[in-house]
Image (cartoon, rainbow, N blue to C red):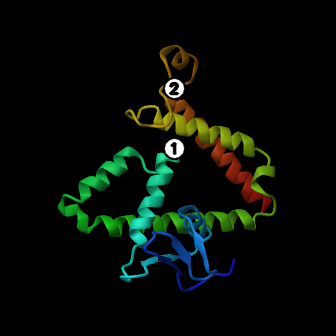
Amino acid sequence: MAEKTEPLLIKRYASRRLYNTETSDYVTLEDIAGFISEGREVQIVDLKSGDDLTRQYLLQIIAEHESRGENVLPVDVLTDLVRSYTTQAQSIVPQFLASSFEMLRDGQSKMMENMNAMPIPMAQMPGFEALQAQQQAFLQAMMSGWPAGSSMPEADDAEAKDTPAKGEDLDDIKRQLAELQKKLSDMN
């Protein structure tokens, strides 16, 4: 899809129906979420008053996705957001969130560029499955000590006796990562 500089204008009628001014048809919240996923900027305005309702509808889209179990925002983050409305932190939270998401987007773009520039797709590289397994082990080791709410359960005592210490896992991961980096360097 060609990149558009102007946001897609959606008008909300008195009946609360949403009208796409670009395609001259009615759209749903899911349609709007799809436009945004495709990289489009969206502006939603009330037809009668001209009020900008974009923020309200974006929050509604997020709430619907979260209520369906598509959890992106941890409870701690939601709690901190609510807390920021009642504290002096309210003034810095929007800038912090915007900067954080911009860094995330930039990092994701650079990673995709680097992966696309590789002579062989990542999934076909020798040792890719081992790297995935090591990443999973690393994440599990890092998150096992976190308090409730973490996505990885702690290992029980019987399982912990059969596995190496976390420090040994980390050293093994570092060693294997260094080997993979050397292989990648040799391929270039």
Question: What residue would you read off at disc 1?
Answer: 69
Q: Secondary structure at mark 2?
A: loop
**Nearest to the observer: residue 167 or residue 19:** 19
Residue 42 point in image, percent of width and height: 51, 75
Q: Residues within 10 Å of mark 1 (few under 14, many from 20)?
A: few
- In the picture, residue 186 is in which quadrant? bottom right
Count of picture labels: 2
Percent position (x, y) of residue 163?
57, 22
* Residue 165, disc: 2
Left-right relation of 181 to 146 = right
The amino acid type found where label 2 is placed reads Ala
CB under 8 Å between callouts 1 and 2? no
As measured in the structure, the alpha-carbon distance from the residue carrying label 1 to the one carrying label 2 is: 34 Å
Query: Looking at the image, which residue is at 81% across and 51% down?
Result: 124
Q: Tell me: 18 left or right of 46.
A: right
Could you tell me which secondary element the residue under label 1 belongs to? loop
Q: Residue at x 79, y 59 (%)?
A: 187
Against 112, residue 159 (above or below) is above
**Up-down: is 9 above or below 60?**
below
Name the quadrant containing residue 129.
top right
Q: Earlier in the sequence, mark 1 or mark 2?
A: 1
Residue at screen point 76% across, 44% down: 127
Circle 2 packing at 10 Å, graded few (<14), some (14-19), many (20+), is few
Q: Nearer the viewer, mark 1 or mark 2?
A: 1
